[in-house]
Image: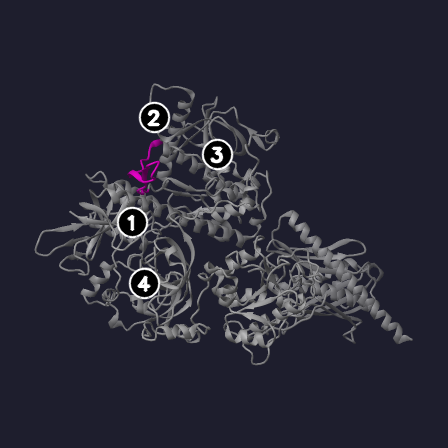
Amino acid sequence: MLQSKTFVKKTRAGRVQKVVREHYLRDDISCGAASCSTCGAVEHPLSADAAAILVVDTNVVLHQIDLLENPAIDDVVLLSVVLDEVKNKNLAVFNRIKALCSNKARRFFVFTNEHHRDTYVKEMVGESPNDRNDRAIRVATRWYQSHLGENVKVLLITNDRDNKRKAIEEGINAETVESYVRSLAQPGLLDLVVVSTSGDVTMEDVEDLRPSKKKVIYSEHKPMSEITAGLRCGIYHQGKLRVNRYNPFEAYVGSESIGDEIVIHGRSNMNRAFDGDIVAVELLPQDQWHESKSFIADDDEDDEEDVHLAPNSADDAPRKANPTQSTAASSADSVSSRPVGRVVGIIKRNWNSYCGSLEPMPMPAGSGGVAHALFVSKDRRIPKIRIQTRQLGNLLDKRIIVAVDSWDVLSRYPSGHYVVLIENDINTRPFSTQVLACLPPLPWTLSPEDLANPNRQDLRHVRVFSVDPPGCRDIDDALHCTPLPNGNFEVGVHIADVTNFVHPGTPLDEEASQRGTSVYLVGQRIDMLPKPLTEDVCSLRADVERLAFSVIWEMTPHADIISTRYTKSVIKSCAAMSYVEAQARMDDSRLVDPLTVDLRNLNSLAKIMRHRRCERGALTLASAEVKFEIDSETHDPLDIGIYQIREANQMIEEFMLAANISVAEKILKHFPLCSLLRRHPSPTKEMLEPLLRTASSVGLNLDVSSSKALAESLDNAKNDDPYFNKLIRILATRCMTQAVYFCSGDLTFSEYYHYGLAASLYTHFTSPIRRYADVIVHRLLAAALEIAKLPPLFQDGPQLTGVADNLNYRHRNAQMASRASVELHTLIYFRTRPMDTEARIVKIKANGFIVFVPKFGIEGPIYLTPKGDKGGDWVVDEVHQRVTKPGTNVSYAVLQTVMIHMEVVEPQPHRPKLQLTLI
Amino acid sequence: MEYVNPLTGFRVDGRRPNEMRQLKGEVGVVARADGSALFEMGNTRVIAAVYGPREVQNKGQQVNSKDALVRCEYRMADFSTGDRRRKPKGDRRSTEISLVIRQTMEASILTHLMPRSQIDIFVQVLQADGGTRAACINAATLALADAGIPMRDIVTSCSAGYLCSTPLLDLNYIEDSAGGPDVTVGFLTKMDKVTLLQMDAKLPMDTFETVMDLAIEGCKAIANYIREVLLENTRRLECQRG
């Protein structure tokens, strides 16, 4: 084995330091081709009968990743130099290409050219790193060609003209992406090819085509060196750009350097930045600071607000710059308004794929040719995207996903290319065969080995039952409650033993970990685990023997926990009830059968526990959950209403909370550094500000010093209006952030606190069928009981943190999806049923107010003035949250009840929306 | 960071997980010392000088008169790391490493053959790139052998770590500072005995065993190399005598 060293110099930020690293060159790296006899590797990802072996350069990977993901492209060699560059430039693309390389079904091979004796290239004097890497790619391509001999064609794919020319001079086969795809003769593929506009072969054609349109719309981005220099001396400010969800022409950049948010008005000031980009911002002179909304009229799109579902927490709620405040400030001509700036450069792009549809347009004459179309994203924060397609007829009126490629100064809209066609429905990937192979043989029955397992307690004789929403198929929790001779109760919570079937490291486990959670849509569910597990093997259905993980307490009749025991078990549920059924049983005083008695005992314990929890300061928060009745044939909603919460729900909830807390204590005791817990950060003063303002305007004083104080003042918030208390609670809930998963080693103990539940420790244990976090916690608990070994994941702190972050992300996405689904169904429902209803004002704005419709849990704007007329003759009273028309006694105050009319209108195709008008 | 590339299985510097860095050993580099050696593991370069056995200089240090007194001083040269900084003498770290080296060497030196005498081992790190502790022990072994001090066996040392769920042999500086566990083993090859085992992190028992086994494999390989260097040196001396 040949080893040699080279020295790499590297400077670090601030001090210049010489770093010397070893770099071993080897002669034992295989080329990965099946036709190669010299390397003698075991695995040959590249097939022997490939028409050509493709070597791609960095820009091809970065820009044509969608093309590479298409199964028509195969036998690709990825050089390590290319992968490194891709990783540095765009992590999202890197992850996609990494997934491609590790996919056994695809023939992609990673060749470590940087460590191969024959392909290592030393930087020459005066050569830029880019040129060096290009040369390394060419050297590796040539090596492949000479290594594999003349029988195999090795093709370098590059869009860089210079690189291609040099390659051909050196006797390497080189082609551009477009010409290669053309040679494959698959017209559909050509749409995936990104036509790049900078320094490319096709550039001249484009310019020739539309010379008249050549008008600079945006100012040029500043070069990176200038930006870093500007950032350092404080002229520019760096931050993440967030576009207002309501008004795509307004954006905010949270800047640490000035400690405030910089407002950016209009597309030209945003200067081609997308939502989520890290940008450099220059502040405008202060006299331009309060031209708050004048830019909006410049553009041709409307800037209305949509009616949407009432948000459940501060994270869901769209960010508002509080236009009331800024307009009020500007009229008063004070300088208190926020800094206004413009984007001078983009430090990191956050270009993603976006879902939406094409703007309707007439079909061009020759349907086979290339057509330009404008894509309108579903997300209003995203500008229209120009795409080129050869299959326009196919794509019109369909939901499609489009990726953004570039946006130059000459074009009003960014250009992109279409990726996937989604027809009508959400793309719910079925589980792969590898995943399904991990399932236990079906039909599954309890095996004697499970019973013989000394760690598994046989609880089949115990009267276990479950209470769930009606129609629930994935039952993951069950309870029992047995009176003990000493007057105490033995209470058990039994959770489906998912980890008995989902073993760490299997494809099934990885898939579940990726999905993170099941997604509940109206009338539909996207599972985290395959259906046989979800609905049969793991589901704790009635009258079948199932494996469970149990937490068993001994409790006094005053609900004091005397002892806690954790065990794997076998149970046989005697009844799977719905909440309604359970409630009916408890309420029916004639029933005295054992099951009902158990229910009543549990209920009385739960009431004490609930009371105690509230005393500790747990918040009873409210959210308006909506329930649909769906037509079984058309899947159209028949009726909607607010989900009703019964005592039975609260009873189950109480025991689940108790089980979660008990488990959290146990796992933290055993694994103080690597437990997965859930915390709910205390809301800051600023977050509670809107709530306090609203409350004080109706003469209510809320004490927010602690969760206990808040809970008490919420309890006292009552007046003659029966819905008032709930409304205040809904507003309070909205000020909170969401609870998040975290790894216990990352934070200190005081930060573990769960504000909403007023619990010092909390985790998720009770729903392993639909949440991956619970699966992790099950494994931790099993390891704590020394039943199973701790999987390697937990020994790697950063990795566990990564899993927790992914879970948080998935969890949020799932919630967004269910909200979107509910919104969609609300829309379908009101399409055929315009109606008048009662609504409550929750927020006063400059030209109207936001109303909340309690009956349907939706929220939306009502305009007092016609569109375009800003402010008008209405005067906003900030302190009292009231808007009045001077000269009349017409006024609207926050929390006031109004009658509204709801109707679906469709101002733009494929973007129907619910319009609310005041009656 | 990926310390082991999941697609190719190579480490950052192009090694496989179970490969050591390039070794280089040279005997007799300090003429005035009784024995001396230079030892390299990749970019880690260490020089060791041995004085003794000689009369005990400070009688107060002598614990018993039946055994030789072994003393060791470990120092890092000011220029050994990227940023040149004056290193204070006798800081916690170097005191600890001095002690570790002394104990490891003492275990293999036949001290009872040299009563009322002392052996001084000076090790200095010329260039640090991870695994200085192991390199120092190897250098000290070579220097002791060069000084002709009777030893039970050749003590060699090697480190191993556990990153990206893979046991890695002979960590370099980047891998060492990744925050993972770092197991340093000192090993007597012929006697098949472990004389030094250090780890300041937590690792599950079964993983620890595989990591330790890997480190022991490394020690064995180093022992082979050191034996070769010594044989080569002896052959050279033989030639010189004629």
Classed neighbour count for the residue bearing mark 3: other residues with Cα under 10 Å, few (<14), some (14–19), many (≥20): many
Residue for point 60% across, 72% down: A172
Chain hosting mark 4: A
- Nearer the observer, A462 or A518: A518
Chain hosting mark 2: A
Q: Earlier in the sequence, mark 3 or mark 2?
A: 3
Residue lying at the far front of the rendered structure: A366
The residue under label 3 is which amino acid type? Ser
Quick check: A664 left or right of A170? left
Q: Separation of disc 3 and disc 2 at Cα? A: 24 Å
Callout in the foreground (4, 1): 1
Chain hosting mark 3: A
- Say which element carries label 3: loop
Dot 4 corresponds to which residue? A251
Dot 1 corresponds to which residue? A308
The residue under label 2 is which amino acid type? Ala
Dot 2 corresponds to which residue? A584
Q: Earlier in the sequence, mark 2 or mark 4?
A: 4
Q: Separation of disc 3 and disc 4 at Cα? A: 47 Å
As for residue A634 lying within the magenta part, the answer is yes
